[in-house]
């Protein structure tokens, strides 16, 4: 894979692929690749994949799922794709309760283009376009898109996980499996956020990036289920 | 009592030397080596035979580099 050493994308790709394999739905799955680091996701999954315009993966997934309701459809998006340019598509697709799975990788930065500030960048976090840290007066507040979409009636399962320790990887896999099972039962949108690192964008080693993530990202983006079976739990 | 022993196989050419498996191993089996692979990364190597086959390293590896084998030994 083309990802940087220690990137959470590789682990998440593997978890999605393992879930597809365990459920035996490889020939019935259609994935939607985003724009961002995961733009080449279709090279790594041996399922039908479609590349969407920047942020438009939920709109494309809506079309695919409505035309072929028996297929399993998932989108795989980063925070620049899902929470910035694609906010309208994300919010409306989930509000309509479209029956697909959204895998959302949140690393608080635009990783692919060189570490610019994203809507999910934390307060005070230095990026290449906010070198002195994000100032809330000037640059606005970080966006908790997961909490936002959890309040929409169409969202059936909303959870936030991470893949930086073996225990978290196991929990994240369970959440992804739950999301695909919800789709098999025809429930509304399942939304799985993976809080991930971006050691190149954060200018840290992979291990230091994971520590930084535990200390800074998790207090703002707490892990755990937010909505289960259509009911808010947090 | 039967004892579970494990062993790992490392695909050195795929390894990017990120080292997250080193922190994930409860038995300190893994360490980043001094040699480099064709991509120029210091790949991970085994430093002892204490592996218990927990597969934490394989679980956390972003590039699926590590294969874990497990065997039960009757004592």
Image: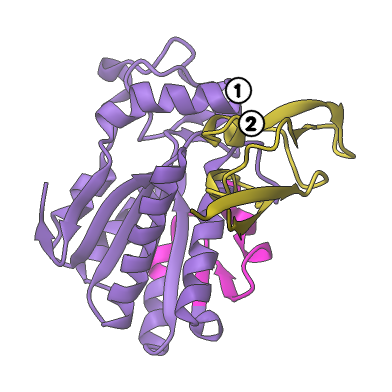
Chain colours: A purple, B yellow
**Mark 2 closeness class: few <14, some 14–19, many ≥20 residues within 10 Å:** many
Residue at coordinates 60% horizontally, 37% vertically from top-left? B21
Element on which disc 2 rests:
loop
Front residue of A208/B45: it is B45
Quadrant housing residue B51: top right
Front residue of A154/A186: it is A186
Position above or below: A151 against A177: above
Element on which disc 1 rests:
loop
Q: Chain of mark 2?
A: B
How far apart, in angstroms, are the residues tagged by discs 1 and 2?
9 Å
Residue A132 highlighted magenta (yes or no): no
Residue A58 highlighted magenta (yes or no): yes
Read off the magenta span: A30-59
**Numbered mark located on residue A20 in the image:** none
Where residue A132 appears, as percent x and y from the top left, is: 44, 9
Residue at coordinates 53% horizontally, 43% vertically from top-left? A8
Position above or below: A49 against A66: above
Residue under circle 2? Answer: B19
**Numbered mark located on residue A205 in the image:** 1
Residue at coordinates 58% horizontally, 28% vertically from top-left? A206
Where residue A135 appears, as percent x and y from the top left, is: 32, 15
Quadrant housing residue A64: bottom left
Q: Nearer the viewer, mark 1 or mark 2?
A: 2
Quadrant housing residue B49: top right
């Amino acid at each position: 894979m083309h990802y940087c050493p220690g990137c959470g994308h590789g682990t998440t790709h593997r978890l999605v692929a393992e879930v597809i394999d365990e459920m035996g739905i490889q020939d019935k799955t259609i994935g939607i690749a985003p724009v961002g680091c995961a733009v080449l996701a279709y090279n790594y999954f041996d399922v039908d994949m479609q590349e969407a315009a920047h942020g438009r993966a939920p709109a494309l997934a809506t079309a695919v799922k409505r035309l072929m309701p028996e297929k399993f459809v998932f989108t795989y998006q980063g925070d620049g794709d899902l929470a910035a340019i694609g906010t309208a598509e994300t919010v409306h697709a989930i509000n309509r309760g479209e029956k697909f799975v959204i895998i959302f990788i949140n690393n608080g930065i635009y990783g692919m283009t060189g570490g610019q500030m994203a809507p999910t960048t934390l307060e005070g976090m230095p990026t290449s376009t906010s070198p002195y840290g994000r100032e809330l007066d000037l640059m606005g507040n970080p966006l908790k898109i997961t909490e936002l979409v959890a309040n929409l009636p169409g969202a059936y399962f909303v959870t936030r996980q991470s893949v930086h320790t073996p225990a978290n990887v196991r929990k994240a896999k369970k959440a992804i499996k739950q999301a695909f099972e919800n789709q098999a039962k025809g429930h509304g949108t399942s939304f799985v956020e993976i809080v991930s690192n971006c050691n190149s964008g954060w200018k840290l080693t992979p291990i230091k990036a994971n520590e930084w993530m535990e200390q800074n990202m998790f207090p703002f983006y707490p892990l755990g289920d937010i909505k289960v079976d259509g009911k808010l739990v947090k | 009592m039967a004892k579970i022993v494990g062993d790992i196989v490392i695909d050195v050419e795929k390894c990017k030397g990120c080292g997250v498996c080193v922190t994930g191993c409860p038995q300190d089996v893994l360490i980043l080596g001094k040699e480099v692979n064709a991509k120029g990364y210091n790949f991970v190597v085994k430093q002892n035979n204490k592996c218990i086959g927990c597969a934490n390293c394989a679980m956390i590896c972003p590039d699926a580099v590590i294969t874990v084998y497990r065997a039960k030994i009757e004592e």
